[in-house]
Image: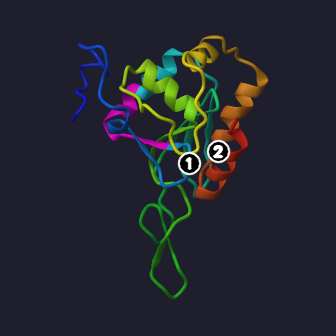
């Protein structure tokens, strides 16, 4: 089901598409969810409207990262990088074939179960009925209350900066573990 650019998620009904039509569990680890490509601009607009702590990471020969802190994790947007002598997201092996890179592939990802649950609710998607793998379910309404009561502080800015360091699979897994409640 394609989400048309001129409409919002969930307009016209009590709930939008099912959550896993928009967010898919990533192979990067528990609590990491890939964002469907046609929702990425809309999610960026939602993030901008809510004045979340944000940071960017720009390093030579690494993907550019834009990151927003959100509850127990956040959202990262990874841009493509091309390393010398190889296609994007690959690195040549000396005397051998091109191997997959440990660098993150381009895309947008939601980090953290609470962040995912908040986005499902605020984008009016139909959410999962049961806990996801590795998730601790909160009392209904707690996630929204935590978000509504948030304050911009040094810890939230630091969380965004930490997310902006996630240029490779290993760092992302480490950060996901560090942010898990």
Direction right: furthest residue: 154
Q: Which residue is mark 1?
A: 30
Which is nearer the N-term, disc 2 or disc 1?
1
Q: Is residue 5 left or right of residue 154?
A: left
Q: Observer-nearest residue: 81 or 101?
A: 101
Residue 162 in percent (x, y) is at: 70, 40
Q: Secondary structure at mark 2?
A: helix
Q: What residue is at 69 percent from the left and 51 percent from the top?
A: 174
x, y percent for residue 59: 63, 50
Q: Is residue 47 left or right of residue 127?
A: right
Q: Residue at 48% x, 86% y: name it.
A: 96
Q: Is residue 28 magenta?
A: no
Instruction: Answer left or right for 164 relative to 101.
Output: right
First to last magenta residue range: 33-42
Identify residue for label 2.
176
Q: Residue at x 64, y 40 (%)?
A: 163
Residue 152: percent from left, percent from top = 70, 17
* Mark 2 and mark 1: Cα distance apart in space: 8 Å
- Whether pointer 2 and pointer 1 mark residues with C-beta atoms closer than 8 Å, the reply is yes
Going 57% across and 58% down the picture, which residue do you hit?
61
User: Label for residue 174?
Assistant: none
Secondary structure state at the residue bearing disc 1: loop
Q: Is residue 120 above or below residue 59?
A: above
Q: Residues within 10 Å of mark 1 (few under 14, many from 20)?
A: some
Q: Nearer the viewer, residue 84 or 21?
A: 21
């Amino acid at each position: 089901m394609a989400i048309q650019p001129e409409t919002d998620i969930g307009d016209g009904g009590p709930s939008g598409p099912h959550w896993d039509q928009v967010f898919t569990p990533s192979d990067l680890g528990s609590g990491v969810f890939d964002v469907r490509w046609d929702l990425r601009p809309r999610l960026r607009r939602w993030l901008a409207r809510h004045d979340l702590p944000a940071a960017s990471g720009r390093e030579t020969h690494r993907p550019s990262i834009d990151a927003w802190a959100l509850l127990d994790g956040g959202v990262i947007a990874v841009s493509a990088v091309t390393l010398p002598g190889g296609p994007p997201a690959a690195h040549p092996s000396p005397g051998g074939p091109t191997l997959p890179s440990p660098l993150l592939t381009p895309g947008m990802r939601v980090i953290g179960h609470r962040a995912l649950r908040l986005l499902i609710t605020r984008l009016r998607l139909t959410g999962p009925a049961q806990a996801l793998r590795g998730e601790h379910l909160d009392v209904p309404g707690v996630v929204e209350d935590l978000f509504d009561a948030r304050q911009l502080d040094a810890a939230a800015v630091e969380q965004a900066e930490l997310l902006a360091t996630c240029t490779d699979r290993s760092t992302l897994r480490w950060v996901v573990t560090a942010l898990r409640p």
